[in-house]
Amino acid sequence: MLRRLQHQRPGSAIHDGCFSRGPNVGESPREGFAFGSYPKGKEAEQTDEWMAKNVTPILYREHRHHAHLHRTLREWAETYRDGVSGKERIVVQYATARPLASTKQDDYVGRMLWALSDQRALPAKRFAEFDPLPSLDWLEPLSEKRFHHEDLARFGVQPNFGKDDSLAFNLVLRPTPYARAPWMTLVHHSDTEASLWDEVMFQIARWLARHLDSRELILWVARHGGVLHTQFAMLLAAALQERKPSPPMRTLWRLALSGRLQSHASRLDFYDWIRTFELDGLTPTLGCNCASYSPHTCGCVNLS
């Protein structure tokens, strides 16, 4: 609820049933917000009424003299009052929860993403080091495109003056602040130049490195391009030395670290490849099929 209020500016008012935006000279029209309650089954109707007044409603269910609104405001006031420690408290509260249980009425996934996006990265560090290990189920909401143009500033990115309604990104794939972005150039030394990580991304990678024995993680890597960021590869290599995943997973991560999970058109679907690998191990034929996942490899896989 309050996430939407963060974008409201002073000076907005409602007169005679319509919204007076009153932008200054040179400013784009401002978006106005208003709290509003709705009875059961009337949310859409109330939304339409507010939108007709050029106001974006922040709606809540009618219950005992606005009890839901009062409780939400108190909880968010406590969180904002406590600063970054309030966000760490959100991480502690929900790190062991299953994201799929989050609902529109109790969107703790949204609260967790808000906390993890703090650029001081202390909530993200708490998440990365939390014991017991947060479920890999959290990777799905971290990968959902929940952020838009109005969220750029919180990630240190200066937005363009005109709003880009098509922009959508997530916590693990997002625009880069200029201080961490590769420079525009005609010539460079590598095939691709990845941006430098911020501290939030580093902490998310530390959490993922604790899931080395997860088949879902290696599939997620392959599904998202298969080429590991240099810093991610270093973290995973170090984790392989510190932890002892099962022999099949250890072999798969060695393939990933060698750059052989980059999948375009291939002779064997990678999901089928993993299933076959788990049944038969790395046979010579399977090794040659894996080599086809990388355009830089034309021979069979050599694990020595």
Image (cartoon, rainbow, N blue to C red):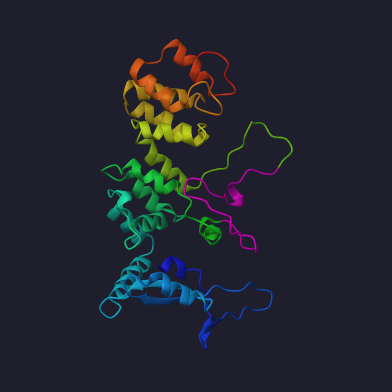
Total numbered badges shown on the rendered structure? 0
Q: Nearer the viewer, residue 8 or 42?
A: 42
In the rendered view, would you say 89 is above or below 194? below
Q: Nearer the viewer, residue 251 or 283?
A: 283
- Which residue is rendered at x = 50% and y = 15% of the image? 288
In the rendered view, would you say 195 is above or below 243? below
Image quarter of the C terminus: top left
The quadrant where residue 21 appears = bottom right
Where residue 32 sits in the image (x, y, percent)? 52, 75
Where residue 125 sits in the image (x, y, percent)? 38, 48
Image quarter of the N terminus: bottom left
In the rendered view, would you say 32 is above or below 14? above
Where residue 270 sits in the image (x, y, percent)? 46, 26
- Which residue is rendered at x = 53% and y = 49% of the image? 174
Read off the magenta span: 157-184
Membership of 79 in magenta stretch: no
Where residue 15 sits in the image (x, y, percent)? 52, 87
Position of 132 with respect to 53 (left or right) is left
The answer to whether residue 227 shows anywhere in this view is yes
The quadrant where residue 189 appears = top right
The residue sitting at the top extreme is 284
Secondary structure mostly seen in magenta is: loop
In the rendered view, would you say 56 is above or below 157? below
The residue sitting at the bottom extreme is 16
Position of 39 with respect to 11 (left or right) is left
- Which residue is rendered at x = 46% and y = 70% of the image? 5
Membership of 177 in magenta stretch: yes
- Which residue is rendered at x = 38% and y = 60% of the image? 84
Q: Nearer the viewer, residue 250 or 181?
A: 250
The quadrant where residue 19 appears = bottom right
The answer to whether residue 301 shows anywhere in this view is no
